[in-house]
């Protein structure tokens, strides 16, 4: 495909300027370019075609099954887009919230923020939530800063350590470290669950809290969670819940009821905002009683019949401009109203059923990483295939030639040759079957023609990439 500059024809343009009908002025020399900018010169139609072709080379959930474990790539109902595109919401100027004079103009937006925060808190069994954080990892940072604020306020100056499970998302230890804590990793057992004995050994007065995911990134529900919570609280340590992926538990169980004190949600995974490649995101935090007074401010609060802003007495302060990514909140609110209570329960039931369906169809051929019951994602170890010279990465590349996005590979790090598959609730049985058929066909070809895998993918706009070079140089050559 030609670059847009290669299509440029000198003198061609997409617009025709009207004759000047205001007095001409001469700009100060300091504001003027000394050399004309190098811009492609094209007609409107060439520009439209160029960008349309580019967009068709992209892969997204709207055109392909995208079973990316720990990332919930599910269909985002278009009704949420329609709601976010309402001019009364989309065109609100953020500065309207900075002056009392304009407060009456933003009452609707405040009401939406107020209601959504309450609904998110309710879904997770918490007292309050804040929509300010603008990514999941940002929510983690805020959550760990809230933990730090709590301990500082309680004179717990000796508490300088956060325990993180070895199956945790890489952002967990990073966020804890950014909030100023030391990080201690606790291993999982053979069965994929946290090692309770190792956790007890790591626990002590110096521990400020623990960060856990449940179901964890092995796709398994942590059955010792209540005991872990009791032990933590015995030391006045707090429990952080990584709620980036809520698909397994919506309407089934609530982190607050399990004993967690703080969590983040990824509205851009579970609640109707498309995501990927770095944004945009919204990673609200939810908190229990212990942490409510430290929440970021200002917060939307009730004021008579309307709403106003207030900063909690011991707030950690502002952590994002205005109210975070407001239009993502609008999508999530639409999604929650659209599904309702029973609808959300059906989401989690179907998400778990679909993952277990894939597990059941593939388990004879791909080695399940664990024996426990999987929740919303199933994890395989392609070690038997790797022994024949075809690694998880090669399987992932070959899947692209079958028209599917690859699952997550090599994460979590605890599983060798890891293939982590999350189908989500929005896929039909036909799609799940087509994917499983492809995986089974691939397994057969590993037996008969393992050599073809080195050349995959061969049907995509770019072929096999040098992954290390491509991360730095987006325009690098294929292998
Ligand atoms: C995606 C994810 C995160 C981080 O979310 P971002 O919005 O990408 O920062 C954290 N934890 C888990 C388990 C995740 O899947």
Image (spheres, rainbow, N blue to C red):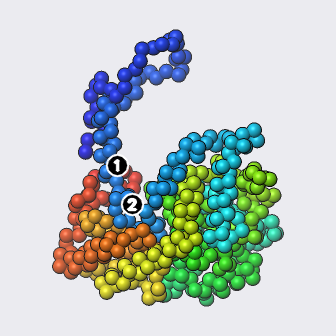
Q: Residue 217 location in percent, x, y?
A: 50, 75
Residue 281 appears at what percent x and percent y? 54, 56
Q: In this view, does 231 lie above or below 8?
A: below
Residue visible at 68% across and 42% down in the picture: 105
Please name the residue that numbered disc 1 is placed on.
Answer: 55
Q: Nearer the viewer, residue 179 or 329?
A: 329
Please report the residue visible at 39 percent of the width from the left and 60 percent of the height from the top.
61
Badge 1: residue crowd in 10 Å (few <14, some 14–19, many ≥20): few
Quadrant of the rendering where the N terminus is positioned: top left
Mark before the other along the chain sequence, 2 or 1 = 1
Which residue is most to the top? 23
Please report the residue visible at 72 percent of the width from the left and 54 percent of the height from the top.
300
Whether residue 392 sits left or right of residue 272 in the image: it is left
Q: Quarter holding the C terminus?
A: bottom left
Position of residue 477 in the picture relative to residue 131 (left or right): left
Residue 214 visible from this viewpoint = no
One can see residue 295 in this view = yes
Whole-percent x, y for residue 176 in the image: 63, 66
Q: Is mark 2 on a helix, strand or loop?
A: loop
Please give left or right for residue 226 compared with residue 67 in the image.
right
In the rendered structure, find residue 61 and report the number of the disc placed on it.
2
Q: Position of residue 13 (x, y in %)?
A: 33, 26
Give the tally of numbered discs.
Answer: 2
Tell me the SS state at disc 1: helix
Q: Mark 2 and ligand 1: say if the CB distance to the nearest ligand atom is below 8 Å.
A: no
Which label belongs to residue 307? none
Q: Which of 235 and 222 is in front in this view?
A: 222
Q: Does the beta carbon of the residue at mark 1 sit less than 8 Å from ligand 1?
A: no
> Residue 45, relative to residue 419: is it above or below?
above
Q: Quadrant of residue 440?
A: bottom left
């Amino acid at each position: 495909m030609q670059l847009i500059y290669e299509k440029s024809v000198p003198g061609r343009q997409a617009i025709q300027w009207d004759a000047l009908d205001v007095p001409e002025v001469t700009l100060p020399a300091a504001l003027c370019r000394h050399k004309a900018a190098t811009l492609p010169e094209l007609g409107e139609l060439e520009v439209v075609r160029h960008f349309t072709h580019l967009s068709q080379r992209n892969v997204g959930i709207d055109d392909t099954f995208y079973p990316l474990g720990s990332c919930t790539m599910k269909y985002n109902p278009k009704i949420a887009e329609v709601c976010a595109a309402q001019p009364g919401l989309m065109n609100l100027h953020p500065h309207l919230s900075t002056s009392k004079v304009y407060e009456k103009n933003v009452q609707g937006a405040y009401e939406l923020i107020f209601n959504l925060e309450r609904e998110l808190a309710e879904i997770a069994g918490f007292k309050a939530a804040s929509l300010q954080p603008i990514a999941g990892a940002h929510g983690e940072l805020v959550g760990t800063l809230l933990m730090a604020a709590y301990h500082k306020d309680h004179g717990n100056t000796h508490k300088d350590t956060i325990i993180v499970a070895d199956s945790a998302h890489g952002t967990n230890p990073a966020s804890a470290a950014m909030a100023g804590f030391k990080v201690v990793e606790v291993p999982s057992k053979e069965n994929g669950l946290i090692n309770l004995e190792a956790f007890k050994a790591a626990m002590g007065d110096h521990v400020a809290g623990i960060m856990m995911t449940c179901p964890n990134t092995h796709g398994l529900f942590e059955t010792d969670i209540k005991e872990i919570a009791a032990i933590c609280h015995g030391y006045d340590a707090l429990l952080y819940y990584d709620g980036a992926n809520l698909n397994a538990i919506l309407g089934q169980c609530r982190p607050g009821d399990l004993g967690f004190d703080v969590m983040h949600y990824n509205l851009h995974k579970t609640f109707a905002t498309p995501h990927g490649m770095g944004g945009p995101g919204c990673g609200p935090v939810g908190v229990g009683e212990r942490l409510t007074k430290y929440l970021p401010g200002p917060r939307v609060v009730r004021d008579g019949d309307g709403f106003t802003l207030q900063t909690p007495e011991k707030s950690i302060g502002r952590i994002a401009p205005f109210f975070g990514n407001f239009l993502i909140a609008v999508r999530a609110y639409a999604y929650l109203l659209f599904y309702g209570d029973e609808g959300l329960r059906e989401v989690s039931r179907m998400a778990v059923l679909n993952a277990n369906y894939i597990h059941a169809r593939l388990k004879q051929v791909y080695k399940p990483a664990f024996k426990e019951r999987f929740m919303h994602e199933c994890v395989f170890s392609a070690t038997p295939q790797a022994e024949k010279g075809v690694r998880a990465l090669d399987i992932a590349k070959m899947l692209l030639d079958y028209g599917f996005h690859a699952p997550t590979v090599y994460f979590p790090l605890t599983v060798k040759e890891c293939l982590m598959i999350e189908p989500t609730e929005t896929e039909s049985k036909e799609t799940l079957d087509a994917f499983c058929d492809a995986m089974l066909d691939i397994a057969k070809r590993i037996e008969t023609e393992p050599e073809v895998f080195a050349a995959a993918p061969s049907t995509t706009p770019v072929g096999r990439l040098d992954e290390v070079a491509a991360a730095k140089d987006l325009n690098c050559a294929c292998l």
